[in-house]
Image: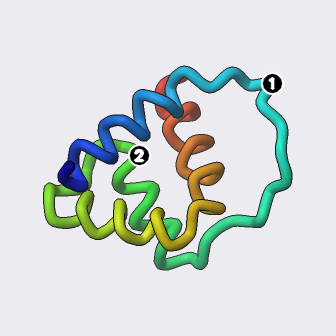
Amino acid sequence: MNAEHDLSILTSFLRRLSPEVEGHDAGDPPEEVAARLDNFATGGADAKERASLAELLKRHPEWLRYLGRKIRSNAA
């Protein structure tokens, strides 16, 4: 499975999340990472950047909540 496919599955999952989902928020990622995730959430990341972010999110799954919030806010 490639990273682009992984991110496609992730974004599909995040779009289905209801606002009622609760959990412990580990905090937002560092500013540089947040900017990269913001770019991804708006569709601005190229294939190389998406692959890089997929690897980063595998190492830091606590940042998925941040990405989910950004994707949801962009879809609204």
Q: Residue furthest front?
A: 1
Q: Nearer the viewer, mark 2 or mark 1?
A: 1
Mark 1 crowdedness (10 Å alpha carbons): few <14, some 14-19, many ≥20:
few
Q: Which residue is mark 1?
A: 20
In the rendered structure, find residue 41 and report the number of the disc placed on it: 2
Nearest the viewer among 7 and 37 is: 7
Could you say where residue 29 lies in the image, as x and y percent from the top left?
61, 71
Amino acid type, residue under disc 2 in the picture: Ala
Could you say where residue 15 lies in the image, as x and y percent from the top left?
50, 26
Q: Residue at x 20, y 49 (%)?
A: 1
Q: Secondary structure at mark 2?
A: helix
**Rendered position, 17 above or below 46:** above
**Rendered position, 49 above or below 10:** below
Find the distance from the CA under tag 2 to the CA under tag 1.
21 Å
Q: Residue at x 74, y 25 (%)?
A: 19
Q: Earlier in the sequence, mark 2 or mark 1?
A: 1
